[in-house]
Image: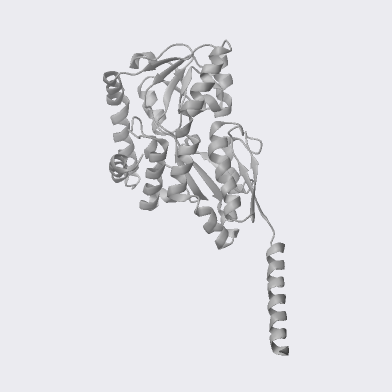
Amino acid sequence: MKKVFLISVLVFLGSAIALGVCEAAPVIKLIYTDHNPPQSWGTVNGTEPWLNQIEKATNGRVKVERYYAQTLVKGTDAWMALKTGVADIAWCAHGYWAGMTPLANAVMLPFLPFKSGRQASGILWKLTEKYPQMGQEFADAHVLLLHCTPPFSLVTTKKQVKTMEDLKGLKLRVLAGPPTDALKALGVVPAMIGMSDVYIAMQKGTIDGMGMPLGVMEIFNLYEVVKYWTHVPLYTAFISVSMSKATWNSLPSDIQKAIMSLSAYEGSRTYAHNYHDSYDEPVRKEMDEWEKKGGQKVEEYVLPKDELDRWIEVAGKPVWDRWVESMEAKGLPARDVLADMLKLIESEPE
């Protein structure tokens, strides 16, 4: 009887000690930086739910301290913030950094027929896993998500673009890499500026427009300064949500596992859909409300297929060929990457 009592006491004490250890385990605080406003569609429907899910999946052992709207670092400095330890997690628009991810830039080639941001995101993740050289391009950090926008269309402030000739001499905000090459071939004067500066630049006439995915119109209230919208699939941008490598390596394995359960291929597809693909209706609503308040109506135009074919011949296929040649000169398997990407566009679910 005494032996049974002693065992029960020991079990109780062991449980109490274990519970005390769990309760005493420190909360891991992760600092997150993002150049987008906290109230934007993508932040509310994509980023915030994902960060909240991380906190829940780790049973509250991880808390994410969020810094939106460049309150910690500028968007152009996000990747460096990870490398220097200023941030633990960062929303990184890789179009800011020319030459950093040359193989991954394949998804930014002009006029690729991606069906959605979700589809493009899954394709990019698969290619990064298949080709070690592509994965190595992100070696300075630990990538959690790779998410792509739907194809960009063109917005302008001074005139409606209906033909290739209308582009000549326009100063447009473009992304680095293949998008810059394509628009240069169409006669555009490219401007590399951060998204937070675009509104004022359009308002003052410093730039004449930009290529952008639909949601950017709502995120940065560009319908207030944009007058024309030409529907043409210019190119796609990709963004990573990445973690400082030092931070990642410091996390317990169960925390790493919990975070990756919401990341990688499926996480990237889900995040891209919530962040990018789901915002057609709210953008239209914002534009309608703006017009009702006395703002100008954004005039839309769908580029005809025969005109689009002209753009592809001049600035599409030649850019693809030059990209392949330049990558192969560096010993990178660009031709295989491009071929695989085109096959995946046909087979990958939308």
Can you name the residue that lies furthest to the front here? 1
Rendering quarter of residue 322: top left
Q: Nearer the viewer, residue 81 or 342?
A: 342
- The reply, left or right, for residue 271 in relation to residue 60 is left
Q: Nearer the viewer, residue 117 or 322?
A: 117
Q: Position of residue 45 (x, y in %)?
A: 54, 37
Q: The N terminus appears in which quarter of the rendering?
A: bottom right
Residue positioned 61% across, 51% down in the render: 55
- The reply, left or right, for residue 327 in relation to residue 196 is left
Q: Position of residue 112 (x, y in %)?
A: 33, 33
Q: The C terminus appears in which quarter of the rendering?
A: top left
Residue positioned 52% across, 44% down in the render: 241
Rendering quarter of residue 199: top right
Q: Nearer the viewer, residue 30 or 137?
A: 30
Q: Is residue 137 visible?
A: no
Relative vertical location of residue 20 with respect to residue 234 in this rendering, above or below = below
- The reply, left or right, for residue 298 in relation to residue 72 is left
Q: Is residue 167 visible?
A: yes
How many numbered discs sit on the rendered protein? 0
Residue positioned 68% across, 56% down in the render: 27
Q: Position of residue 54 (x, y in %)?
A: 57, 50
Q: Position of residue 30 (x, y in %)?
A: 63, 50
Rendering quarter of residue 233: top left
Q: In this figure, which colouring scheme has been used for the structure?
A: one colour
- The reply, left or right, for residue 338 in relation to residue 1 is left
